[in-house]
Image: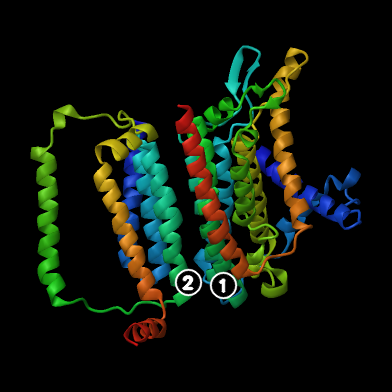
Amino acid sequence: MLHLILFLFFGAICVAGAINLLVQSHPINSALSLIAVMASLAAEYLLLGAEFVAAVQVIVYAGAIMVLFVITIMLLNAGKEERSKGSRVAILLGVPGVLIGGVLVAWTLLYRSNLQAVIPIGALRGDPADIARLLFHNFLLPFEVTSVLILIAIMGAVVLASRPHAVARAARKDEG
Amino acid sequence: MVGLLLFGVAYSVWLERKVAAHIQNRWGPTRVGPFGLLQPIADGVKNIFKEDLTQPHVYKPLYIAAPIISLVFAITSISVIPFGNWVNVGPWGTFLQITDLNIGLLVVLGITSMGVYGIALAGWSSNNKYSLLGGLRASAQMVSYEVSLGLALVGVVIMSGSLSLRDIVDFQGGRFWGFIPRWNIFHGQTLGFFIYLISAYAETNRGPFDLPEAESELVAGYHTEYSSMKFAMFFMAEYANMLTVACLATIMFLGGWHGPIFGPAILQAVLPVFWFCLKAFFFMFLYVWVRWTLPRLRYDQLMAFGWKVLLPLAVANIVYTALVVAWRA
């Protein structure tokens, strides 16, 4: 029972944070509500029994990636965003899209999910050893391919961040 | 437990002032109580009764939230630290630990990694260039050194095969050849220990890595605009973080509560806690000692050292440990 109450509580925080992220006009407030969303997601994982995933969620997303977001906002000293009326395309496509999505999710939950075989919260175990076995045995190839993908992204970032005149000088040297 | 931690925080401030004074051939606090032992209480009362200034140019919600964030995360991380073995008090028995999780180590790392927000937001919301520079320096430094801090601990995790802090301590029981304790520092993790130690100093913003509050350049860094109890909260958070790091070093490398156990039953129950506290106290003393011995680094030197020296060393330590463990298996 307590599990369910806590689960709903953190779920509510998660949704409220996500809405606040969109509503706030100052970027740092938006970033902070995103952190709240990440942290409450971690709490949800913890309640579901996935302790390792919860810890990784906090360390990687809330502790590392969002810190970089906050530093960037601080460095750029980004001001308040300007309010616009919103485009007509967004209203024409967005509102029906949200409605259709909501109906689809509700329909799936009500008619397609196997409600008889409900797994109680906290019944599944997510030990680090189990996750390691999945990652390094069953899903080894996707895991390694992802690491190559990240490497490519790093190389792209280095190229973009390197000074343009240095690149131009290197190109001239190649020609001459 | 939290009360115990805050007590520890108060007296580590006293310890710092006393040791710092003796290193500089002074006396330190002597007036309040014997050996100045009541000084922390006087400091606390003074901080609570001081005027709490809020500058008009600060961004108020975050300005108030920042010290709270710092202190809450600093105190929370102590909850999974085991500071003693099983004890029996009359008919009841308990482990001297609030809760044992099978990912205890990751919880400590996760919570301490959240602590950086307090400092970054304090620097930004103060709306002051010294504060902003201090906050930026602090967050960049903490993010950089967290990497080598975490990697230095991986060696220990590989050896003990568990992320639970209690299992890691249990793994370090016993002796080599009857007299050298089987602590991880004597068990192939000497390099890991020193990487951890250096990264921990940078992670807690202590000298010689106290650039975020370098008085000669930045006035007081991220807490320039803070006064009264809000300043004291940052101060307490710093010392609570130091205590957590010291406890973690004791658990991961110095065998936790393991030590010579002898005497009657009551002594046998108290001795493990005593050994744990003694080791943690040694780290706190080392903190102060290092601070008054080494000069402050330059910022680019700090970054270059973190990424170009400590990180490769930590990775080499992991590869070496993994190879040795795989060879023995």
Q: Is residue A109 left or right of residue B48?
A: left
Q: Which residue is mark 1?
A: B132
Say what amino acid the circle numbered 1 marks. Leu
Image quarter for residue A167? bottom left
- Residue drawn 91% across the image and 51% down it: B31
Whether residue A22 is visible to the viewer of this picture, yes or no, is: yes
Image: A167 above or below B237: below
The image position of residue B250, as x and y in percent, is 65, 37
Marks 2 & 1, CB-CB < 8 Å contact: yes
**What secondary structure is found at the residue carrying circle 1?**
helix
**In the rendered image, which quarter contains the C terminus of chain B?**
top left
Q: Which mark is residue A16?
A: none
Q: Which residue is mark 2?
A: A74
The image position of residue B259, as x and y in percent, is 71, 25
The image position of residue B55, as x and y in percent, is 61, 74
Whether residue B108 is visible to the viewer of this picture, yes or no, is: no
Image: A70 above or below B75: below
- Residue drawn 59% across the image and 76% down it: B128
